[in-house]
Image: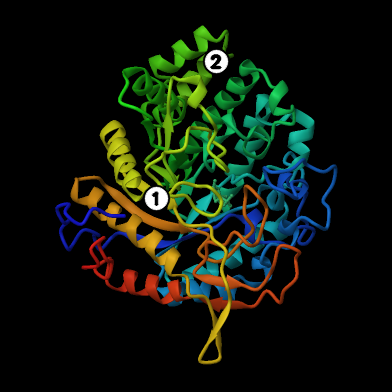
Amino acid sequence: MTDPTAPRPSPDAFPDTFLWGGATAANQIEGAHDQGGKGVSLQDVLPRGLTGPRTSHPTPDNLKLQGIDFYHRYAEDIALFAEMGFSVFRFSIAWSRVFPHGDDELPNEEGLAFYDRVLDELEKHGIEPLVTISHYETPLALAEKYNGWTSREMIGCYERYVRVLFDRYGHRVKYWLTFNEINSVLHAPFMSGAITTPKEELSRQELYQAVHHELVASALATKIAHETVPDARVGCMVLALPVYPLTPHPSDALAAMHADHANLMFGDVHVRGAYPGYALRHMRENGIELDITDEDRELLTHTVDFVSFSYYMSVCETADPELRTAGEGNIMGGVPNPALQASEWGWQIDPTGLRIVLNQFWDRWQKPLFIVENGLGAKDELIHVDGRPTVNDDYRIAYLNDHLVQVAEAIADGVDVLGYTTWGCIDLVSASTAQMSKRYGFVYVDRDDDGNGTLARHRKKSFDWYADVIRSRGASLLRGDGTP
Ligand code: BGP
């Protein structure tokens, strides 16, 4: 919980220009997996997310095939976001809707037209789009043909895709994110990097070469945007994970630094335009020899305009192998923190960590920061109040409230924060477990883990709470002692 004795941020902590909203990803909401000329994405063969094996083809038990049917209900959903007062909505474009196989000769017009309609609707409500170009949904054909990002061929496929997006939507979309949680490829090579080689057989050499190809592709997208879309602002997107030493022992502090470096490298390359010394040393000492061309080096100098990130939890690290038990449900590894509580899915809740990471990123990069994912996955119970279906999700309100208080603290610390989009502003299919029951939304969607339900939308208690926060520009947030 927030420390009630801490100095208070100024009441004007959130500037007028602060963007308030929510975030989603195509594969977790759209459904319509075989409509509008869409090709198969790697999510279509992951019926259990990261918790089970992939299948050879899409199977009916995969909830993402129908998602929450945003493909047909986007207008209703966007109207609900507008009702809460969103000034920004983060969504991703499904690469396989635009290029069904990833390397088709021509883009799929029907797929492009769908996103025109989504943008029309956002424009109608005055909501700024924030578009993720690639969010864990690479066309499956590219994974199978090239072994995903291990192959340099992927850079060319991605380039053709982004050129089509900038050309089509550049005049309507200002904020672009190149890859969702780009650093997660180190831990989830198939979902994040479309790499079909099983994780245990994948060499460090291949993995880091894949990382390099993604970093070059990301820089290339930034370069193209800057050349062709004058108003575009391009950001990288990293999974932020503050790492604390498990004990005050210097060897634990060093272990924490190394774990931190593995993640920070991605932002360092995106912001500084070259690999940092500690990364070069890591590669040297692990026998990793990257194939880097002169052209790659030049491309990497095209750096991002801002840094965006997801934040759900912090972890601890230790040099003691006996204490190195992996955190439950946490794909990024690390050791659980004995001082923190965890969500029902084992993700440790640490609002202060958000302030810490905002300060760390700002001190390190001096680039505007955008929190593009944060939220609590929890089981909700649908009840009726005055005959209206709703959810009393005080636990979600408490989680978001405490994290936003820490954002205000960071802004008072002098950190430049562009905005905040809560993850899964409407219930959606979970990425890690592919469940519906791991809910994040302000809006309840009537669908269960077996795929049953009417897909009807219901406002939760947090819906009104968030509307108040936005309307009051954060003044309605409560501190740990219950005071505004
Ligand atoms: C991030 C992903 C999202 C999202 C979120 C919550 O890692 O970018 O796609 O799903 O985590 O995770 P989950 O859905 O597994 O609860």
Q: Nearer the viewer, residue 80 or 350?
A: 350
| Above/below status of 82 relative to 32 | below
Q: Name the residue: 30% across, 36% down.
A: 360
Is residue 481 left or right of 116 when viewed as pictured?
Answer: left
Q: Under tag 2, what secondary structure?
A: loop
Where residue 102 sits in the image (x, y, percent)?
72, 41
Q: Nearer the viewer, residue 291 or 226?
A: 291
Q: Name the residue: 84% across, 46% down.
A: 57
Amino acid type, residue under disc 2 in the picture:
Ile
Find residue 75 and report its image quarter: bottom right
Q: Under tag 1, what secondary structure?
A: strand
Is residue 359 left or right of 246 when viewed as pictured?
Answer: left
Is residue 361 left or right of 438 when viewed as pictured?
Answer: left
Residue 287 seen:
yes
What residue does disc 1 label? 371
| Above/below status of 298 relative to 383 | above
Residue 273 seen:
no
Pick whichever of labels 1 and 2 is earlier in the sequence.
2
Amino acid type, residue under disc 1 in the picture:
Ile
What residue does disc 2 label? 292
CA gap between label 1 and label 2 equals 31 Å
User: How many numbered marks, from 0 up?
Assistant: 2
Q: Name the residue: 61% across, 18% down.
A: 204
Query: The N terminus appears in which quarter of the rendering?
Result: bottom left
